[in-house]
């Protein structure tokens, strides 16, 4: 979720060959890591997540925590 990915990243050819559909580069692994739903959407801020609930199984992030 953290907004630290370069969204203007131009994927090298090796990334495109590994998986042309991902907006980021995943070169290895048996499983595709799909983070596209919440890809780089949350700008880090001071004391973040200090008041967020951590209840399994969903670990939903309420607005403003």
Image (cartoon, rainbow, N blue to C red):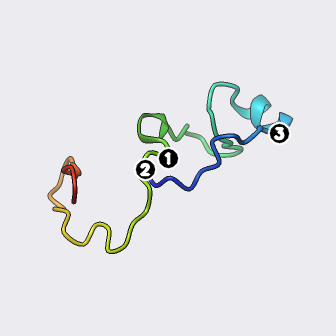
Circle nearer the viewer, 3 or 1? 1
Q: In this view, does 2 lie above or below 12?
A: below
Mark found first going from the N terminus, 2 or 1: 2
Precedes in sequence: disc 3 or disc 1: 3
Left/right placement of residue 48 relative to residue 42 reads left
Residue 7: x %, y % from top left:
63, 42
Tags 2 and 3 touching, CB below 8 Å: no
Q: In which image quadrant can residue 12 be found?
A: top right
Q: Where is residue 42 in the image (x, y as percent from the top left)?
A: 41, 51
The Cα atoms of the two marked residues, 2 and 3, are separated by 23 Å
The residue under the point 59% across, 41% down is 30
Find residue 45 and report its horizontal and vertical position in percent.
39, 66
Q: Residues within 10 Å of mark 2 (few under 14, many from 20)?
A: some
Gap between marks 3 and 1 measured at Cα: 20 Å
Secondary structure type for disc 1: loop
Q: Reading the chain from its start, which is encountered first: label 2 or label 3?
A: 2
From the image, state whether disc 2 or disc 3 is nearer to you: 2
* 10 with respect to 23 (left or right): right
- Image coords of residue 27 (percent x, y): 71, 44
Residue at coordinates 63% horizontally, 34% vertically from top-left? 23
Q: Name the residue under label 1.
A: 40
Label 3: which secondary element: loop
Q: In which quarter of the image is the C terminus?
A: bottom left
**Which residue is label 3 attached to?**
12
Residue found 16% across the figure and 62% down from its top: 53
Quarter of the view holding residue 25:
top right
Residue at the disc numbered 2: 1
Of the pair 1 and 21, the residue shown nearer to us: 1
Is disc 2 placed on a helix, strand or loop? loop
């Amino acid at each position: 979720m953290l907004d630290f990915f370069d969204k203007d990243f131009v994927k090298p050819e090796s990334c495109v060959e590994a998986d042309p559909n991902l907006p980021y580069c995943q070169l290895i692994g048996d499983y595709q890591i799909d983070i596209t739903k919440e890809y780089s959407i949350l700008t880090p801020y001071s004391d973040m997540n200090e008041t967020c609930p951590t209840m399994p199984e969903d670990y939903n992030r309420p607005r403003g925590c």
